[in-house]
């Protein structure tokens, strides 16, 4: 096979896939800049006649989006960070520490969480949150978000930690590093790609979470973005462009975070971590 | 690396302190508005009350007035809350806006299960919801409050909120269901406004022949086609059929009911409804009609305001007419009867203290007034649920005028099945209608399945 | 050395917070609601114990088994169609130097959207008259298809949307594993004369088997629990054609107030999921030495 084809073929396949992915996004972006429903319905992929950047100002001011945005941002971030920390610790204990039988039991126990159909739990969770006296506070979201992310995160981080060769850690421990030191200084840095991946996934889950947020929070200024989006969806009838503007506002920050993290962290640290 | 970890840990600590701060912050936020409401309570009208600072208390209020379309309803609610807060010292209404179906099918049921509903909340009547909650002692008995306020006889019908002669909820408004039609499309095709079922069907046939979809329909949510089926059944089997089936004196397996289902199936098979209706939601149905692609729309009278000069369907302003479902030849009972629903309103938690009760009383007094009933009618075409001086119920809106004329001409009214039967029966009803549309059921099979579900509920009551 | 890694105090310190939080918010509610599966509780009045009545009812509930069948379609589609594609795309992306960052960012984009947004978006894509798919078909003179309202097409439409939403997510997982493989291994093979294709099949794929195994597990678990996408796109319609176990259960429990029955159904969903993953582990995962469950 000539070298050129070998180089171009993967790109061709990938470009087709990327096109399929971006297609709806282009539609959202175009629609968010249009003036009327009519323009969207009659020519969904036509260019807007006039770029309506005012839509963004309108969307931002309407329905308290800025307030919801802030709530969503710090709740999603804090719960994702907490879940990463807890699950990395647990994954380390399961994957690297030598209490194998115990680890096996705990691992299976946590794994069960992946199979539990979550929706029916929420009455029971509601009663729990109510009993804990945290209903209508952000704790009522922070704790379930963190807890909800644990099974998946542990599962994934364990898989990554198991793949790390024994020798690295053994050498460090022979050099006198304790188990906690080994965790923080040897294993954790090596697992950074996995941690970042899990972090992003958890962040996304929290950022988009609607059910619990709508359920446990009944105070307007504690609401999160997805709940605010419902106001948009109901205004749907009056303004498709605003709905799409809302979508852009809710998607953009997470897209930026992702683009930033995957560039600087995954690449940089994978290379650095493995070589070092 | 260590540095990175330290920053991570630090940011966790920081974030959790933000979390705490916000939780606390929120409680503090209460004070400014409390101090703001205190002077208000010392207004001249309250001069009798002691000047001593009153203890502030929260009253949670769940409503469904979200978004642009509901802005007038929300404005009324805001006024009522403001008035009530002024009248009851210390009262602070905590408004919680939740999307209708989420509140109705998820949040409220779960809160009821946990024994923690809001103090004031939007609810639907009937055995599947309001009456079920009332029977489980979750709702406040409003009978003494209504007596005290002297508005007991002001309501036209609270029956779907009544249990054992006591009233547990108050309907906010009412609506009828009938045919909206596109005047231009009818005229262009030489069709006069149908007076009988035969004329209506002839109109469908003419339109169909010219490649125009006769009826806009979006049956993704089954309650939408259910409206038409409900009225068809009443025309064929009489306006007392809904109540009869609900209390067990009549059956859905009666030949007249089967005939109604058969008529509906015939229309489906003849292609009178929007193609692909099972994938179209309620908004989509409205859009089909607004776009001028379909000639008829069977919908609730709340739709009328859509065609006002400010409405979403302003392109059809002045081009829309309304008539009640025409008479069916050989149909049982009053053929002028119209559907009339007053099934949505507010109910109140039975778990309230004296303060909260006072706030609830003020809320009822302020909200359920002739003024707001008339305003709701003028702004949103909501028919009154209270007895209102007929001279005040005039409308400049041409569609609303026709609605009023049609309702005035009606001899009797009939309710909606879903306000009279239990949840599982309703579920079977919805399932059978959609199966009929998908060609997976037939009229006889459908009525038998629904009647079977109803028999089971009736047996359980005994 | 062994002693260090056996320190029980550190072990507990590392494990207990997770177990505690997880137990409180998952296991405790599960146990609490499992009890209701044996009752006729309507989420309101006193619950009556009815033994296995709900389970007997579930076995005779045709609608429930239709939804079980639909879940099986989700599993088949994701394991046999999505997973091979995921591996292919991951290998391709890891193999290119140019535009790698661009690909990585783009493929993940659909997973960023919340399911409700995807519902709005794909509602437009599938729209019978203005939607992209039918416009595309019309270029070839094909009659419009009623994607979401035709009982024949609705489930496939949801499966496609679901794949669109989640494939990128899994690609990123697999990609992270590929990128974590020490560069030396591939470099050594390259020096030995292995072609890119040989390296992908002989070296990379075996090394990422644990992650692929996880992806398969997640796909099965995800397919068993799938509900959001169905609720926003068709709400189980047309006429029950896309009803899945979880959507059926939620409707029964919440909308129609049969909480006891709904809970019994969720126990059955859990049991079926457990059974399937156990079968997967026994039949497939055991062959891979490196996967331990």
Image: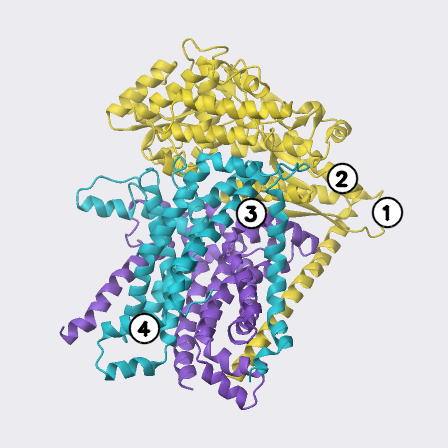
Chain colours: A purple, B yellow, C cyan
Q: Position of residue B154 (x, y in %)?
A: 68, 24
Q: Position of residue C248 (x, y in %)?
A: 48, 41
Q: Compared to C194, does B281 lie above or below? A: above
Say which mark, if any, is on residue C61: none
Q: CA distance from mark 1 to mark 2?
A: 20 Å
The residue identified by callout 3 is A120
Q: Quadrant of the C terminus of chain B?
A: top right
Q: Position of residue B114 (x, y in %)?
A: 66, 45
Tell me whether marks 3 and 4 sit on the same chain. no
Nearest to the eye among marks 1 and 2: give it.
2
The residue identified by callout 1 is B50
Looking at the image, residue A100 sits to the left or right of residue B36; the answer is: left
The residue identified by callout 2 is B357
The residue identified by callout 4 is C204
Nearest to the eye among marks 3 and 2: give it.
3
Q: Given the current orientation, which residue lies at the most extreme top position? A: B330
Looking at the image, residue C127 sits to the left or right of residue C240; the answer is: left
* Badge 2 element: helix
Looking at the image, residue A86 sits to the left or right of residue B198; the answer is: right
Q: CA distance from mark 4 to mark 2?
A: 70 Å
Q: CA distance from mark 3 to mark 2?
A: 34 Å
Work out whether residue B234 or residue A37 is closer to the camera in this orientation and state it: B234
Question: To which quarter of the image does residue B432 belong?
Answer: top left
Work out whether residue B407 or residue B266 is closer to the camera in this orientation and state it: B266
**Residue A38 visible in the picture:** no
- Residue drawn 57% across and 33% down? B376
Q: Are marks 1 and 3 in contact (CB under 8 Å)?
A: no
Q: Position of residue C283 (x, y in %)?
A: 39, 58
């Amino acid at each position: 096979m000539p070298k050129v084809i070998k180089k171009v073929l993967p790109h061709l396949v990938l470009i087709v896939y990327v096109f399929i992915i971006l297609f709806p996004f282009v539609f959202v972006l175009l629609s968010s800049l249009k003036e009327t429903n009519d323009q969207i319905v009659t020519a969904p992929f036509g260019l807007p006649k006039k770029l309506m950047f005012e839509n963004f100002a309108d969307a931002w001011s309407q329905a308290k989006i800025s307030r919801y945005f802030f709530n969503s941002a710090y709740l999603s971030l804090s719960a994702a960070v907490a879940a990463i920390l807890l699950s990395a610790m647990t994954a380390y204990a399961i994957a690297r520490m030598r209490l194998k039988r115990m680890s096996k039991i705990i691992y299976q126990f946590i794994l069960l969480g992946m199979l539990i159909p979550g929706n029916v739990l929420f009455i029971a969770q509601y009663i729990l949150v109510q009993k804990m006296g945290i209903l209508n506070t952000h704790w009522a979201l922070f704790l379930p978000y963190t807890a909800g992310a644990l099974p998946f995160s542990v599962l994934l981080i364990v898989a990554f930690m198991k793949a790390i060769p024994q020798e690295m850690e053994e050498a460090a421990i022979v050099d006198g590093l304790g188990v906690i030191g080994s965790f923080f200084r040897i294993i954790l840095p090596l697992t950074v790609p996995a941690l970042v991946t899990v972090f992003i996934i958890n962040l996304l889950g929290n950022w988009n979470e609607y059910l619990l947020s709508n359920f446990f929070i009944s105070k307007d200024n504690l609401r999160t973005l997805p709940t605010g989006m419902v106001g948009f969806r109901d205004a749907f009838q009056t303004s498709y462009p605003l709905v799409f503007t809302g979508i852009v506002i809710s998607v953009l920050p997470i897209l930026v975070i992702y683009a930033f993290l995957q560039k600087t962290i995954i690449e940089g640290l994978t290379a650095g971590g493995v070589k070092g | 690396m260590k540095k990175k970890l330290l920053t991570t840990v630090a940011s966790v600590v920081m974030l959790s302190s933000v979390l705490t701060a916000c939780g606390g912050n929120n409680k503090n936020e209460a004070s400014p508005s409390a101090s703001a409401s205190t002077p208000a309570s010392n207004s001249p009208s309250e001069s009798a009350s002691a000047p001593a600072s009153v203890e502030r208390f929260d009253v949670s209020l769940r409503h469904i007035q979200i978004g642009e379309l509901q802005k007038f309803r929300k404005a009324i609610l805001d006024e009522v809350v403001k008035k009530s807060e002024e009248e009851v010292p210390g009262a602070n209404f905590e408004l919680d806006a939740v999307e209708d179906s989420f509140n109705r099918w998820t949040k409220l049921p779960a809160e009821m299960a946990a024994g923690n509903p809001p103090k004031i909340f939007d609810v639907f009547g009937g055995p599947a919801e309001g009456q079920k909650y009332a029977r489980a002692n979750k709702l406040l008995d409003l009978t003494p409050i209504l007596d005290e306020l002297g508005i007991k006889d002001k309501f036209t019908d609270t029956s779907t909120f009544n249990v054992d002669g006591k009233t547990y909820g108050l309907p906010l408004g009412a609506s009828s269901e009938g045919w909206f039609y596109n005047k231009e499309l009818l005229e262009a095709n030489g069709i006069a406004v149908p007076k009988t079922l035969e004329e209506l069907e002839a109109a469908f046939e003419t339109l169909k022949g010219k490649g125009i979809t006769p009826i806009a329909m979006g049956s993704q949510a089954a309650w939408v086609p259910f409206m038409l089926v409900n009225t068809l059944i009443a025309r064929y089997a009489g306006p007392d059929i809904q109540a009869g089936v609900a209390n067990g004196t009549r059956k859905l397996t009666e030949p007249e009911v089967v005939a109604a289902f058969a008529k509906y199936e015939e229309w489906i098979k003849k292609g009178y409804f929007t193609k692909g209706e099972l994938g179209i939601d309620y908004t989509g149905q409205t859009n089909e009609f607004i776009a001028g692609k379909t000639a008829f729309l069977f919908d609730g009278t709340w739709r009328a305001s859509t065609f006002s000069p400010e409405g979403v369907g302003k392109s059809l302003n002045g081009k829309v007419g309304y008539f009640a479902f025409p008479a069916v030849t050989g149909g049982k009972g009053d053929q002028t009867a119209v559907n009339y629903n007053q099934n949505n309103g507010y109910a109140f938690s039975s778990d309230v203290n004296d303060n909260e009760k006072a706030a609830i009383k003020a809320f009822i007094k302020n909200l359920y007034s002739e003024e707001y009933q008339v305003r709701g009618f003028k702004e949103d075409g909501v028919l009154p649920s209270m007895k209102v001086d007929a001279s005040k119920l005039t409308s400049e809106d041409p569609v609303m005028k026709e609605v009023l004329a049609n309702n005035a001409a009606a001899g009797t009214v009939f309710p909606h099945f879903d306000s009279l039967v239990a949840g599982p029966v309703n579920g079977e009803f919805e399932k059978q209608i959609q199966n009929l549309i998908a060609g997976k059921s037939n009229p006889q099979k459908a009525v038998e399945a629904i009647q079977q579900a109803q028999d089971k509920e009736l047996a359980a009551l005994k | 050395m062994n002693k260090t890694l056996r320190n029980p105090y550190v072990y507990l310190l590392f494990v207990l917070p997770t177990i505690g939080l997880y137990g409180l918010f998952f296991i405790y509610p599960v146990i609490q609601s499992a009890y209701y599966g044996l009752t006729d509780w309507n989420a309101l009045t006193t619950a009556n114990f009815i033994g296995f009545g709900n389970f007997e009812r579930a076995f005779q509930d045709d609608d429930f088994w239709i939804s079980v069948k639909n879940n099986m379609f989700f599993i088949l589609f994701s394991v046999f169609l999505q997973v091979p594609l995921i591996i292919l795309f991951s290998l391709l992306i890891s193999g290119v130097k140019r535009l790698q960052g661009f690909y990585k960012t783009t493929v993940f984009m659909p997973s960023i959207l919340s399911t409700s947004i995807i519902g709005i978006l794909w509602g437009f894509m599938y729209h019978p008259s203005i939607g992209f798919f039918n416009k595309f078909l019309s270029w070839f003179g094909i009659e419009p298809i009623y994607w979401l309202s035709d009982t024949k097409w609705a489930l496939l439409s949801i499966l496609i949307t679901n794949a669109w939403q989640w494939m990128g997510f899994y690609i990123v997982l697999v990609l992270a594993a590929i990128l974590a493989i020490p560069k030396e291994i591939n470099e050594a093979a390259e020096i030995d004369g292995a072609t890119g294709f040989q390296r992908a099949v002989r070296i990379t794929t075996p090394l990422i088997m644990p992650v692929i195994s996880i992806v398969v597990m997640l796909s099965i678990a995800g397919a068993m629990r799938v509900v959001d996408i169905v609720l926003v796109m068709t709400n189980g319609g047309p006429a029950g054609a896309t009803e899945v176990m979880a959507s059926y259960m939620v409707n029964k429990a919440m909308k129609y107030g049969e909480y006891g029955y709904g809970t019994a159904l969720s126990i059955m969903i859990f049991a079926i999921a457990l059974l399937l993953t156990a079968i997967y582990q026994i039949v497939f995962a055991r062959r891979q030495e490196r996967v331990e469950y």
